[in-house]
Image: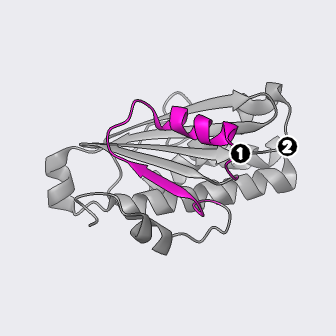
Amino acid sequence: MGVDGLSIDLIRRGLASERLGRHIYLFGRTASSCALARQLADAGAEEGTVVLAEDGARLHLAVLLRPDLPLRSAARFASIATLALADTLGADGAPDAVECTMAAQGAQYVILGVGAEWRPRRDAAAGVDRNAFTAAFLNHLDRWFTRWEAGGIGALDVGRRASSRLIPGEGGHARQ
């Protein structure tokens, strides 16, 4: 199914994480994968729950995390999504456009949202595998989350400096 659509089974095959992706929800068009993840979080969903939605050339992904952090630190914590994206974008088949969002509900949970868009012709020509991209992003996100848990926000500084070459507005240029 790689190029044509997302498959929970194919994504799970690529996961190394024991935490992220144990529960994956897959939708077609939806108003917001983050809003769906928020509803699941409010209903008691486990940390690591992933909500995916596919809308033509666009993939929407939201991950529910329950870090132990004060609300004022949530925005800095969300940089783990940017770092995970920078690591994932180094692979072949990177999307043409990406965006990151974050929503925090007090100290109860954080939802990290990512949107990625591919040009349809490029998908077919390059053999882009969105399942592999999704699994790679979740693996990188888990690695950065584990690093944050071990050393706090300071543990992310080295990664942020290394990734600045890939992140626009951080002193470097995005990968073309």
Check disc 1 and report the residue beneath it: 44
User: Mark 2: which amino acid?
Assistant: Asp
| Lateral position of residue 90 relative to residue 138, left or right | left
Which residue sits at x=27%, y=45%?
118
Residue 55 in view here: yes
| Lateral position of residue 65 relative to residue 120, left or right | right
Which residue sits at x=74%, y=43%?
157
Q: In which quarter of the image is the C terminus?
A: top left
Nearest the eye: 124 or 157: 124
* Span highlighted in magenta in the image: 20-46
Check disc 2 and report the residue beneath it: 68
User: Mark 1: which amino acid?
Assistant: Gly
Q: Is residue 167 magenta?
A: no
Q: Is residue 42 magenta?
A: yes
Which residue sits at x=81%, y=27%?
71
Disc 1, SS = loop
Q: Classify 82 as above or below 71.
A: below
Residue extending furthest front?
Answer: 43
Q: Classify 174 as above or below 148.
A: above
Packing grade of label 2 (10 A; few <14, some 14-19, many >=20) is few
Q: Position of residue 101 (x, y in %)?
A: 55, 31
Which residue sits at x=48%, y=32%?
168
Q: Position of residue 55 (x, y in %)?
A: 29, 41
Packing grade of label 1 (10 A; few <14, some 14-19, many >=20) is few
Residue 78 in view here: no
The circle on residue 1 is none
Label 1 to label 2, Cα distance in Å? 16 Å
Of the residues under marks 1 and 2, which one precedes in the sequence? 1
| Lateral position of residue 88 relative to residue 66, left or right | left
